[in-house]
Image (tube, rainbow, N blue to C red):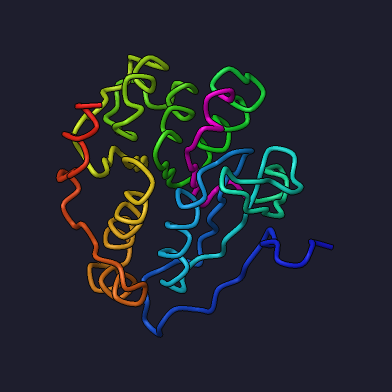
Amino acid sequence: MARRGAVTGRKMLRPGKPGGKGSGMEVNVLLFPDFETLDAFGPVEILGRSGEYLLNYVSVDGGMVRSRQGAEIATRALEAVSKTGILLVPGGIGTRPLVCDSDFLARLGEAARNAEYCLTVCTGSALLAKTGLLDGRRATSNKRAIDWVVSVNPAVNWVHRARWVVDGKFYTSSGVSAGMDMALGFLADRLGREAAEEAALGAEYLWNRDRDNDPFACDAQQL
Protein backbone atom coordinates (compact mmCIF):
# COMPACT_ATOMS: atom_id res chain seq x y z
CA MET A 1 0.00 0.00 0.00
CA ALA A 2 1.33 3.45 -0.91
CA ARG A 3 2.24 5.63 2.04
CA ARG A 4 -0.12 8.41 3.01
CA GLY A 5 0.38 11.48 0.85
CA ALA A 6 2.07 9.61 -1.98
CA VAL A 7 0.68 9.72 -5.50
CA THR A 8 -0.51 6.30 -6.64
CA GLY A 9 0.53 4.75 -9.91
CA ARG A 10 -2.78 4.96 -11.74
CA LYS A 11 -5.57 7.52 -11.87
CA MET A 12 -8.77 7.08 -13.86
CA LEU A 13 -10.26 10.36 -15.00
CA ARG A 14 -13.92 11.02 -15.53
CA PRO A 15 -15.16 10.78 -19.11
CA GLY A 16 -15.13 14.00 -21.08
CA LYS A 17 -18.18 15.88 -22.31
CA PRO A 18 -20.64 14.02 -24.54
CA GLY A 19 -19.44 14.26 -28.10
CA GLY A 20 -15.82 14.80 -27.10
CA LYS A 21 -13.18 13.77 -29.61
CA GLY A 22 -10.87 11.96 -27.19
CA SER A 23 -10.22 8.25 -27.37
CA GLY A 24 -9.72 7.34 -23.72
CA MET A 25 -6.05 6.91 -24.55
CA GLU A 26 -3.58 5.98 -21.82
CA VAL A 27 -0.82 8.39 -20.84
CA ASN A 28 2.31 6.77 -19.39
CA VAL A 29 4.25 9.33 -17.35
CA LEU A 30 7.77 7.90 -17.17
CA LEU A 31 9.46 8.91 -13.92
CA PHE A 32 13.02 8.45 -12.65
CA PRO A 33 15.00 9.67 -9.63
CA ASP A 34 15.48 13.45 -9.55
CA PHE A 35 12.97 14.22 -12.30
CA GLU A 36 11.72 17.82 -12.27
CA THR A 37 8.32 17.84 -10.58
CA LEU A 38 6.59 20.46 -12.77
CA ASP A 39 7.96 18.83 -15.93
CA ALA A 40 5.70 15.87 -15.16
CA PHE A 41 2.81 17.36 -13.25
CA GLY A 42 2.33 20.51 -15.31
CA PRO A 43 1.29 18.42 -18.35
CA VAL A 44 -0.52 15.97 -16.05
CA GLU A 45 -2.65 18.86 -14.77
CA ILE A 46 -3.48 19.96 -18.32
CA LEU A 47 -4.14 16.52 -19.79
CA GLY A 48 -6.13 15.53 -16.72
CA ARG A 49 -8.45 18.49 -17.14
CA SER A 50 -9.58 17.26 -20.54
CA GLY A 51 -11.24 14.22 -18.97
CA GLU A 52 -10.13 12.13 -21.94
CA TYR A 53 -7.14 10.20 -20.65
CA LEU A 54 -6.14 7.42 -18.29
CA LEU A 55 -2.96 8.46 -16.47
CA ASN A 56 -0.33 5.91 -15.46
CA TYR A 57 2.72 6.83 -13.39
CA VAL A 58 5.45 4.42 -14.41
CA SER A 59 9.17 3.81 -13.98
CA VAL A 60 11.50 1.18 -15.40
CA ASP A 61 11.05 -1.21 -12.49
CA GLY A 62 8.11 0.28 -10.56
CA GLY A 63 8.08 1.36 -6.92
CA MET A 64 8.52 4.73 -5.25
CA VAL A 65 10.30 7.45 -7.24
CA ARG A 66 11.41 10.73 -5.68
CA SER A 67 11.51 13.96 -7.67
CA ARG A 68 14.23 16.59 -7.39
CA GLN A 69 11.91 18.59 -5.13
CA GLY A 70 11.16 15.61 -2.86
CA ALA A 71 7.74 14.49 -4.14
CA GLU A 72 7.44 10.72 -3.73
CA ILE A 73 5.40 8.98 -6.41
CA ALA A 74 4.25 5.34 -6.38
CA THR A 75 4.85 3.98 -9.88
CA ARG A 76 4.00 0.86 -11.81
CA ALA A 77 6.61 -1.02 -13.82
CA LEU A 78 6.78 0.15 -17.41
CA GLU A 79 6.32 -3.44 -18.60
CA ALA A 80 2.98 -3.66 -16.76
CA VAL A 81 1.17 -1.02 -18.84
CA SER A 82 0.11 -0.70 -22.45
CA LYS A 83 2.70 1.19 -24.49
CA THR A 84 0.40 2.09 -27.38
CA GLY A 85 -0.93 5.40 -26.04
CA ILE A 86 0.97 8.54 -25.07
CA LEU A 87 4.42 8.52 -23.49
CA LEU A 88 5.34 11.59 -21.41
CA VAL A 89 9.00 12.00 -20.45
CA PRO A 90 9.96 14.81 -18.03
CA GLY A 91 13.44 16.24 -17.63
CA GLY A 92 15.50 17.40 -14.70
CA ILE A 93 18.92 16.78 -13.23
CA GLY A 94 18.12 13.06 -13.15
CA THR A 95 18.50 12.89 -16.93
CA ARG A 96 22.28 13.38 -16.71
CA PRO A 97 23.23 9.87 -15.55
CA LEU A 98 20.46 8.25 -17.60
CA VAL A 99 21.96 9.25 -20.96
CA CYS A 100 24.68 6.71 -20.10
CA ASP A 101 22.28 4.00 -18.86
CA SER A 102 21.93 1.54 -21.73
CA ASP A 103 19.18 -0.51 -20.07
CA PHE A 104 17.03 2.56 -19.38
CA LEU A 105 17.57 3.87 -22.92
CA ALA A 106 16.64 0.53 -24.47
CA ARG A 107 13.36 0.43 -22.55
CA LEU A 108 12.65 4.07 -23.30
CA GLY A 109 13.31 3.49 -26.98
CA GLU A 110 10.91 0.54 -27.08
CA ALA A 111 8.20 2.49 -25.28
CA ALA A 112 8.64 5.53 -27.52
CA ARG A 113 8.56 3.45 -30.71
CA ASN A 114 5.31 1.78 -29.64
CA ALA A 115 3.60 4.95 -28.41
CA GLU A 116 1.14 6.73 -30.67
CA TYR A 117 2.51 10.03 -29.39
CA CYS A 118 5.64 10.85 -27.41
CA LEU A 119 5.88 14.09 -25.41
CA THR A 120 9.06 15.28 -23.69
CA VAL A 121 9.60 18.24 -21.39
CA CYS A 122 12.87 20.07 -20.77
CA THR A 123 15.89 17.73 -20.89
CA GLY A 124 13.60 14.74 -21.32
CA SER A 125 14.31 15.35 -25.01
CA ALA A 126 17.97 14.49 -24.39
CA LEU A 127 16.93 11.03 -23.23
CA LEU A 128 14.74 10.52 -26.27
CA ALA A 129 17.50 11.86 -28.53
CA LYS A 130 19.96 9.35 -27.10
CA THR A 131 17.73 6.50 -28.33
CA GLY A 132 18.22 7.72 -31.91
CA LEU A 133 14.50 8.23 -32.51
CA LEU A 134 14.94 11.97 -33.03
CA ASP A 135 17.77 11.67 -35.58
CA GLY A 136 17.04 14.07 -38.44
CA ARG A 137 13.96 15.44 -36.69
CA ARG A 138 13.30 18.88 -35.23
CA ALA A 139 13.24 19.08 -31.44
CA THR A 140 13.89 21.51 -28.61
CA SER A 141 14.83 21.47 -24.95
CA ASN A 142 15.57 23.68 -21.94
CA LYS A 143 17.61 26.58 -23.27
CA ARG A 144 19.75 26.70 -20.11
CA ALA A 145 20.89 23.17 -20.89
CA ILE A 146 20.82 23.31 -24.69
CA ASP A 147 24.59 22.97 -25.15
CA TRP A 148 24.63 19.76 -23.13
CA VAL A 149 21.52 18.46 -24.88
CA VAL A 150 23.04 19.07 -28.32
CA SER A 151 26.21 17.25 -27.22
CA VAL A 152 24.13 14.19 -26.34
CA ASN A 153 23.09 13.78 -29.98
CA PRO A 154 24.09 16.36 -32.63
CA ALA A 155 22.18 14.36 -35.29
CA VAL A 156 18.94 15.96 -34.07
CA ASN A 157 17.85 19.22 -35.72
CA TRP A 158 17.80 21.16 -32.45
CA VAL A 159 15.66 24.31 -32.46
CA HIS A 160 17.26 26.91 -30.20
CA ARG A 161 14.27 29.23 -30.08
CA ALA A 162 10.92 27.49 -29.60
CA ARG A 163 8.48 27.03 -26.74
CA TRP A 164 7.68 23.61 -28.15
CA VAL A 165 8.27 21.72 -31.40
CA VAL A 166 6.16 19.12 -33.20
CA ASP A 167 7.69 16.65 -35.65
CA GLY A 168 5.43 13.74 -36.50
CA LYS A 169 4.31 12.01 -33.33
CA PHE A 170 7.02 13.69 -31.27
CA TYR A 171 6.31 16.79 -29.19
CA THR A 172 9.29 18.34 -27.37
CA SER A 173 9.18 21.42 -25.16
CA SER A 174 11.56 23.91 -23.65
CA GLY A 175 12.11 24.06 -19.89
CA VAL A 176 9.75 23.27 -17.02
CA SER A 177 6.59 25.40 -17.44
CA ALA A 178 6.87 25.09 -21.24
CA GLY A 179 5.54 21.57 -20.80
CA MET A 180 2.15 23.04 -19.92
CA ASP A 181 2.12 25.13 -23.10
CA MET A 182 3.06 22.04 -25.10
CA ALA A 183 0.36 19.95 -23.41
CA LEU A 184 -2.21 22.62 -24.25
CA GLY A 185 -0.94 22.63 -27.84
CA PHE A 186 -1.29 18.85 -27.90
CA LEU A 187 -4.88 19.12 -26.66
CA ALA A 188 -5.62 21.72 -29.32
CA ASP A 189 -4.20 19.42 -32.01
CA ARG A 190 -6.18 16.40 -30.82
CA LEU A 191 -9.36 17.77 -29.29
CA GLY A 192 -9.64 21.27 -30.74
CA ARG A 193 -8.70 24.77 -29.65
CA GLU A 194 -11.78 25.12 -27.44
CA ALA A 195 -10.76 22.11 -25.31
CA ALA A 196 -7.29 23.59 -24.81
CA GLU A 197 -8.68 27.01 -23.91
CA GLU A 198 -11.06 25.41 -21.42
CA ALA A 199 -8.22 23.47 -19.77
CA ALA A 200 -6.07 26.61 -19.52
CA LEU A 201 -8.95 28.58 -18.03
CA GLY A 202 -9.71 25.85 -15.51
CA ALA A 203 -6.07 25.83 -14.40
CA GLU A 204 -5.99 29.67 -14.32
CA TYR A 205 -2.98 29.44 -16.61
CA LEU A 206 -1.93 32.01 -19.23
CA TRP A 207 -1.23 29.83 -22.23
CA ASN A 208 1.58 30.86 -24.56
CA ARG A 209 -0.18 29.76 -27.75
CA ASP A 210 2.71 30.54 -30.09
CA ARG A 211 5.03 27.56 -30.07
CA ASP A 212 7.75 29.56 -31.83
CA ASN A 213 7.74 32.27 -29.14
CA ASP A 214 10.23 31.31 -26.44
CA PRO A 215 10.64 34.38 -24.18
CA PHE A 216 13.39 32.69 -22.18
CA ALA A 217 15.72 31.83 -25.06
CA CYS A 218 17.61 35.16 -25.09
CA ASP A 219 18.17 35.22 -21.34
CA ALA A 220 19.43 31.64 -21.39
CA GLN A 221 21.94 32.42 -24.13
CA GLN A 222 23.41 35.20 -21.99
CA LEU A 223 24.22 32.87 -19.06
Query: In the rendered image of this protein, does residue 196 appear above or below residue 168?
Result: below
Task: Residue 188: name its quadrant.
Answer: bottom left
The percent position of residue 162, horizontal first and vertical second, equals 21, 39
Along the viewing direction, whichever of 202 and 156 lies nearer the viewer: 202
Query: In the rendered image of this protein, does residue 182 appear above or below residue 7?
Result: above
Along the viewing direction, whichever of 128 and 217 lies nearer the viewer: 217
The answer to if 86 sits in the magenta stretch is yes
**Residue at the extreme front:** 223
Query: In the rendered image of this protein, does residue 181 appear above or below residue 18?
Result: above
Q: Is residue 142 left or right of residue 84?
A: left
Task: Residue 213: name its quadrant.
Answer: top left
Residue ID at (66%, 62%): 7
The percent position of residue 26, horizontal first and vertical second, equals 55, 58
**Residue at the extreme right:** 1
Tell me the quadrant of the picture where the N terminus can be found.
Answer: bottom right
Q: Is residue 185 left or right of residue 169?
A: left
Residue ID at (45%, 47%): 116
Residue ID at (28%, 56%): 185
The range drawn in magenta is: 82-98
Tell me the quadrant of the picture where the C terminus can be found.
Answer: top left
The percent position of residue 58, horizontal first and vertical second, equals 65, 48
The percent position of residue 196, horizontal first and vertical second, equals 29, 68
Along the viewing direction, whichever of 125 and 114 lies nearer the viewer: 125
Q: Is residue 85 left or right of residue 49?
A: right
